[in-house]
């Protein structure tokens, strides 16, 4: 620490309430072995990748009697939005993710003694450490204008050198105290940069808990630590916070691997013991034959709300994500179909190292299994709750026709033939719409045409006959035999051989399709026999005879 560095540090940060030593006392070491965190930027919605990371971090903490905390990383002031924090906490709560510390109290008030848990409220803490780095000559103010930086890049381009502010390309690196004083007196704006070693050919080995040692180019850039606004960059802020909040495991997206060397340099420069790092692979999306990261802007499914809107259950989403995290989870789930996911002994050992494709087919099959496990009462009540939020018209009909709704949902469920019609709650509308008069009317407007062989005369005669003989108490097999026989009497072939004789106007299938279309205005309905039972004689007569 030279005198002029110390003078510079005091000039830039004249009165700060803390020193690194006082912060050590304010944020004492914890006695627990595992402290993890989720550090989202409140940018407007909860990303499915964020849920994935927090599920993992929360489990790793709590399975080891540790602490999981939420830290709001709002240093990128432009992107911040109102209610961003409550959107995150409410979203995580839906997944049953228990947060021990963070802005999780009433009105996003802090809970926990390692706060504030919002980076924008920690300005003087970050400045304390930057001041320390300036005093030790490891950080310096840089007054370059945008034009000057652009000119440096231009020069580097021509010389085929890496682009950026570093080493001999950083004019303010070697500025004297007087030059800095003069620039400040002129009112020039400045950032504070890290003084890296500036040697692009130096390499380092860094340890990741799931990837092992990663060898990479060492950081040589004089990265910005404090922006012109006095707000720190993520690099500095998270290193300071993870230290003071006593994080033991940093579980974060692999997109941070390129800055890993810088983070370790900063940690060491500040005299902190580095936490363990776990860089997890992102969720990917298939795109034009390739794969890419789910994009906040382009992909609606990046937002968890998308899945809630569709009526995927939390259980299905959690099971799906656990399947990605740990290849042994699926077998465990089969053995423990109703167990809380928190009973699963998740470890980081089997985390995938390359991005998992977000596989909607797999999610659907899990989601289908989850809804299939529900009793029909549960399906009805959970479905109603979903509809009250996302499909109000349907909710209204479900409320005024509870019995019919129950019977319609119950068709063939939990039988040998269970067609497992429900994957997500938004499937309810498609499966219920035939039964309510109100939605049936809308369907009729776009109903498919009857098969060609059904002329108005044939239709009228068959229906008269059918209604005369129809009996709702018939077993399904008997019901079908009867349908075939009545159809046969009206010149519809019961078998392929009969049809080949050329003596028939159509087949039994045509008659069944006619009934389906007249009764449901759709060719895709639940089993016809049970559908008829749910509709009841009165409705059947009305729909068949009009
Ligand atoms: N705010 C960072 C992000 O949203 C957090 C990264 C980390 O967990 O350290 O990517």
Image (cartoon, helix red, strand yellow):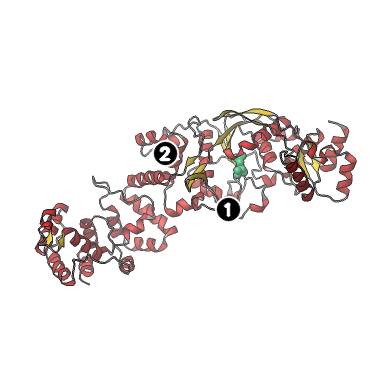
N-term mark: 2 or 1: 1
Q: Is residue 458 left or right of residue 341?
A: left
Q: Which residue is mark 1?
A: 44
- CB at disc 2 and ligand 1 closer than 8 Å: no
Q: Is residue 312 left or right of residue 107?
A: left
Identify the image quadrant of residue 166.
Answer: top right
Q: Which residue is mark 2?
A: 340
Question: Dot 1: few (<14), some (14–19), or many (≥20) neighbours within 10 Å?
Answer: some
Identify the image quadrant of residue 67.
Answer: top right
Q: Is residue 452 left or right of residue 349?
A: left
SS at mark 2? loop
Write the residue at 18% across / 66% down.
453
Q: Is residue 97 left or right of residue 400?
A: right
Write the residue at 36% across / 49% down.
423
List x then y, in percent, for residue 216.
64, 31
Viewer-closest of 104 and 159: 159
Question: Dot 2: few (<14), some (14–19), or many (≥20) neighbours within 10 Å?
Answer: few
Residue 71 seen in the figure: no
Above or below residue 39? Residue 267 is above
List x then y, in percent, for residue 357.
47, 42
Identify the image quadrant of residue 522.
Answer: bottom left
Viewer-closest of 182 and 100: 182
SS at mark 1? loop
């Amino acid at each position: 620490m030279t005198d002029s560095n110390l003078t510079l540090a005091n000039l830039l940060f004249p009165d700060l309430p803390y020193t690194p030593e006082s912060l050590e006392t304010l944020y004492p070491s914890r006695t627990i072995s595992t402290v993890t965190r989720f550090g989202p930027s409140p940018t407007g919605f909860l990303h499915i990748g964020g849920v994935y990371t927090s599920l993992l971090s929360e489990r790793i903490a709590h399975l080891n009697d540790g602490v999981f905390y939420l830290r709001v990383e709002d240093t990128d002031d432009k992107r911040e939005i109102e209610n961003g924090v409550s959107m995150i906490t409410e979203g995580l709560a839906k997944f049953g993710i228990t947060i021990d510390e963070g802005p999780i109290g009433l009105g996003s008030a802090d809970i926990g003694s390692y706060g504030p848990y919002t980076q924008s409220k920690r300005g003087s803490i970050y400045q304390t450490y930057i001041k320390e780095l300036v005093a030790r000559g490891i950080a310096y103010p840089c007054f370059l204008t945008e034009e000057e930086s652009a000119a440096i890049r231009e020069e580097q381009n021509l010389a085929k050198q890496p682009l950026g502010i570093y080493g001999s390309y950083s004019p303010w690196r070697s500025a004297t105290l007087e030059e800095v004083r003069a620039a400040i007196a002129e009112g020039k704006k400045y950032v504070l940069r890290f003084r890296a070693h500036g040697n692009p050919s130096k390499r380092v080995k860094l340890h990741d808990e799931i990837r092992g040692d990663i060898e990479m180019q060492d950081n040589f850039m004089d990265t910005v630590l404090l922006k012109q606004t006095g707000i720190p960059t993520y690099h500095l802020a998270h290193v300071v916070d993870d230290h003071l909040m006593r994080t033991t495991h940093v579980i974060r997206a692999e997109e941070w691997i390129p800055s890993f060397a810088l983070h370790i340099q900063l940690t060491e420069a500040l005299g902190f013991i580095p936490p363990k790092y776990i860089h997890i692979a992102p969720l990917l999306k298939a795109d034009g034959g390739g794969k890419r990261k789910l994009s906040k802007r382009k992909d609606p499914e990046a937002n968890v709300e998308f899945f809630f809107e569709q009526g995927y259950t939390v259980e299905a989403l959690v099971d799906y994500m656990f399947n990605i995290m740990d290849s042994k989870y699926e077998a465990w789930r089969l053995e423990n179909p109703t167990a809380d996911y928190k009973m699963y002994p998740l470890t980081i050992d089997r985390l995938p190292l390359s991005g998992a494709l977000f596989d909607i087919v797999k999610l659907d099959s899990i989601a289908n299994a989850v809804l299939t496990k529900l009793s029909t009462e549960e399906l009805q009540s959970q479905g109603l709750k979903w509809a009250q939020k996302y499909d109000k018209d349907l909710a209204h009909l479900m409320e005024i026709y509870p019995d019919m709704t129950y019977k319609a949902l119950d068709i063939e469920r939990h039988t040998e033939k269970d067609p497992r019609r429900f994957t997500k709650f938004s499937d309810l509308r498609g499966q219920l719409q035939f039964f309510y008069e109100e939605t049936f009317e809308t369907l009729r407007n776009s109903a498919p045409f009857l098969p060609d062989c059904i002329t108005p005369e044939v239709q009228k005669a068959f229906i008269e006959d059918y209604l005369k003989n129809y009996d709702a108490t018939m077993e399904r097999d008997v019901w079908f035999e009867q349908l075939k026989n009545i159809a046969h009497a009206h010149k519809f072939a019961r078998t392929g051989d009969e049809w080949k004789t050329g003596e028939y106007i159509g087949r039994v299938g045509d008659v069944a399709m006619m009934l389906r279309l007249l009764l449901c205005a759709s060719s895709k309905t639940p089993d016809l026999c049970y559908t008829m039972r749910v509709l009841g004689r009165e409705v059947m007569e009305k729909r068949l005879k009009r």
